Amino acid sequence: MIGVVARIKIQEGKAAEAETVLKELVAAVKANEPDVPVYDLFKAKDGSGDFIMLEMYPNQAVLDAHQKTAHFQAVGAKLMPLLAGAPKLEFLDGA
């Protein structure tokens, strides 16, 4: 199992738009990627305004396939102008 924690920093004043875009991605993953058991969006409680995406994949092939989907690519294009920097990704191995 592979876990991913993605911390997404958004430009000031763009949080509502970014949340809508990120929720589109969550819905698309849940509807179209049955091999992805966890793909959920959270808001950081540290006052930063960051969004946190928690993801889980059974193996590297499923993670690689996820990153190549049309919906991932489309949302990435919508999200890019809203970002306040590159997302910070943490990759985890299942224990």
Image: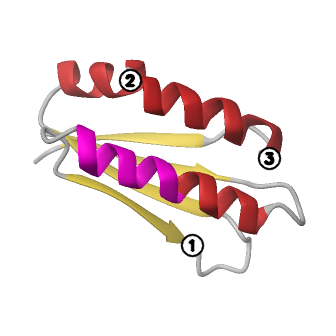
Numbered disc 1: secondary structure: strand
- Residue for point 62% across, 61% down: 20
Q: CA distance from mark 3 to mark 1?
A: 16 Å
N-terminal of the pair, mark 2 or mark 1, is 1
Is 66 left or right of 15, judged from the image as shown?
left
Where, by quadrant of the figure, is residue 35 drawn?
top left
Q: CA distance from mark 2 to mark 1?
A: 24 Å
Residue 43: mark:
1
From the viewer's perspective, is residue 60 above or below residue 26?
A: above
Residue 73 among those drawn in magenta: no
Magenta region, residue range: 23-32
Residue 82: mark:
3
* Image position, residue 9 (x, y; %): 72, 54
N-terminal of the pair, mark 3 or mark 2, is 2
N-terminal of the pair, mark 3 or mark 1, is 1
Numbered disc 3: secondary structure: helix
- Residue for point 19% across, 18% down: 61
- Residue for point 51% across, 40% down: 89
**Residue placed most toward the observer, 81 or 87:** 81
* Image position, residue 50 (x, y; %): 67, 64
Q: Residues within 10 Å of mark 2 (few under 14, many from 20)?
A: some
Residue 88: mark:
none
Which residue is outermost to the right? 13
Q: CA distance from mark 3 to mark 2?
A: 21 Å
For badge 2, the amino acid type reads Thr
Q: Which residue is mark 2?
A: 69
For badge 3, the amino acid type reads Leu
